[in-house]
């Protein structure tokens, strides 16, 4: 009995020591290079730098941008390495990806992206990711939001078929169906997807690939340029609303599609109009912005509503929207964003009277079809 108690006590002491060690290291980041720490976690030995360290939670980043979020009591054998932490260069990351994925794959690099794709396929992927990245920068800069440069090369993995994609996702603890063509993982910082054309480049199907690239690369870019905070909770309506907004050609390719109507995501608009006409409860905006329940309970309509709200706010209240996005992203690392704080931040940005805002919002979306003619 006493042995067990002693073991637990020493683990806690080690955990607290480790946390203090991380904290002092994390504080030193402003004027020195971030420290590199090695430790054992579950079955692996990791080398990473701390971005948050408390007695109950530690968040660390690897040189490839991978994130570990754990209880410090689960870590052991920690030590500070003599080398400072530095993010991988594109060249280092390319080498690491080639050895991870083997000779069935090629890695194509562009300015910010490294895309792993099946060998021998004509590379249409990397350019598409890079194009989205540039549109993203331009779109926000034009609206007074200036994305930061990503700390890590952005990585996307394109699998030749559903099976290999599903297998990879399972290793990350993700369960995917054929309908989930791709996803962005906050843990690995990568986008993974499969080619729905199976290399045939059927044009109609290829469009689905492009839509997946746009949606998931928007998530990835937003989390890597400070538009969202990767280490603190953000409202789902804002995260998914931005990604669905970029799906419209007038947003991701405004040079070739420069009319107002091109910025409207027609599928999401029709979904929302139908929902607003048949099921939506009056005065439900406050609940929608303060918690994520809609995305669990009614995902088929929540995505449309998230799109509609982001589109309305960014088109009609761009300055308030920019201030709101900054406020949400500025939460401290590791913070949980309570319903009350979410409501307060939303009202501080867009006004106290949410029922009036809701009336304007609904009218605006209702009038969209006539503005698109
Ligand atoms: Zn999404």
Image: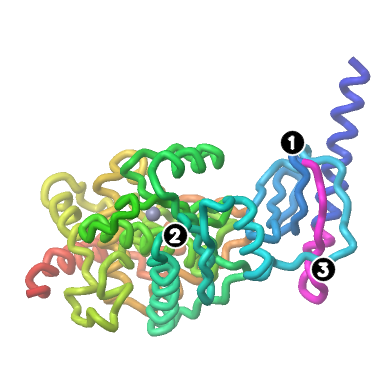
Residue 52 screen position, x and y as percent: 71, 56
Question: Is 38 a magenta residue?
Answer: yes
Residue 182, above or below 63: above
Image height of 118 relative to 172, above or below: below
Looking at the rendered structure, the secondary structure element under dot 2 is loop
Q: Earlier in the sequence, mark 2 or mark 3?
A: 3
The answer to whether 358 appears left or right of 83 in the picture is left
Residue designated by label 3: 28
SS state under label 3: helix
Q: Nearer the viewer, mark 2 or mark 3?
A: 2
Give yes or no for contact between labels 2 and 3 (Cβ–Cβ under 8 Å).
no
Q: Is residue 145 visible?
A: yes
Name the mark on residue 43.
1
Q: Secondary structure at mark 1?
A: loop
Dot 2 corresponds to which residue?
A: 120
| Mark nearer the N terminus (1 vs 2) | 1
Name the residue: 48% across, 66% down.
222
Which mark, by number, is residue 178? none
Q: Residues within 10 Å of mark 2 (few under 14, many from 20)?
A: few
Q: CA distance from mark 1 to mark 2?
A: 36 Å
Q: Regarding ligand 1, which quadrant of the image does it lie in?
A: bottom left
Q: Quadrant of residue 161?
A: top left
Residue plotted at (81% across, 76% down)? 31
Q: Which residues are magenta?
A: 23-40
Q: Are marks 1 and 2 in contact (CB under 8 Å)?
A: no
Q: Position of residue 131 (x, y in %)?
A: 40, 74
Q: Residue at x 78, y 38 (%)?
A: 73
Asked if residue 258 lies left or right of residue 331, the reply is: left
Q: Quadrant of the C terminus?
A: bottom left
Q: CA distance from mark 3 to mark 1?
A: 29 Å
Of 86 and 225, the residue lying toward us = 86
């Amino acid at each position: 009995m006493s042995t067990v108690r002693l073991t637990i006590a020493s683990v806690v002491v080690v955990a607290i020591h480790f946390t203090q060690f991380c904290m002092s290291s994390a504080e030193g980041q402003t004027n020195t290079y971030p420290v590199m720490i090695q430790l054992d976690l579950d079955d692996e030995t990791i080398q990473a730098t701390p971005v948050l360290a408390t007695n109950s939670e530690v968040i660390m980043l690897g040189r490839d941008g991978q994130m570990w979020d754990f209880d410090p009591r689960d870590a052991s054998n920690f030590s500070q390495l003599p080398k400072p932490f530095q993010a991988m260069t594109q060249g280092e990351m390319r080498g690491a990806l080639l050895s991870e994925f083997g000779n069935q794959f090629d890695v194509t690099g562009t300015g910010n992206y490294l895309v792993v794709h099946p060998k021998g396929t004509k590379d249409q992927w990397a350019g598409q990711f890079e194009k989205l990245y540039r549109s993203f920068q331009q779109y926000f800069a034009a609206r007074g939001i200036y994305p930061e440069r990503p700390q890590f090369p952005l990585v996307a993995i394109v699998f030749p078929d559903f099976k290999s994609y599903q297998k990879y996702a399972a290793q990350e603890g993700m369960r995917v169906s054929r309908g989930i063509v791709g996803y962005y993982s906050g843990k690995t910082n990568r986008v993974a997807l499969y080619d729905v054309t199976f290399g045939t480049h059927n044009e109609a199907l290829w469009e689905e690939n492009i839509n997946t690239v746009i949606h998931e690369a928007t998530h990835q870019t937003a989390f890597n340029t400070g538009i969202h905070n990767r280490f603190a909770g953000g409202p789902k309506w804002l995260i998914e609303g931005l990604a669905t907004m970029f799906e419209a050609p007038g947003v991701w390719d405004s040079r070739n599609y420069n009319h107002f109507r091109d910025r409207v995501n027609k599928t999401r608009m029709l979904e929302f109009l139908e929902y607003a006409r048949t099921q939506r409860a009056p005065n439900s905006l406050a609940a929608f912005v303060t918690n994520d329940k809609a995305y669990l309970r009614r995902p088929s309509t929540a995505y449309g509503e998230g799109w509609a709200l982001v589109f309305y706010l960014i088109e009609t209240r761009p300055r308030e929207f920019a201030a709101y996005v900054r406020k949400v992203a500025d939460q401290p690392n590791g913070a949980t964003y309570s319903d009350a704080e979410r409501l307060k931040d939303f009202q501080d940005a867009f006004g106290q009277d949410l029922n009036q805002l809701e009336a304007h919002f609904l009218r605006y979306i209702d009038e969209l079809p006539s503005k698109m003619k």
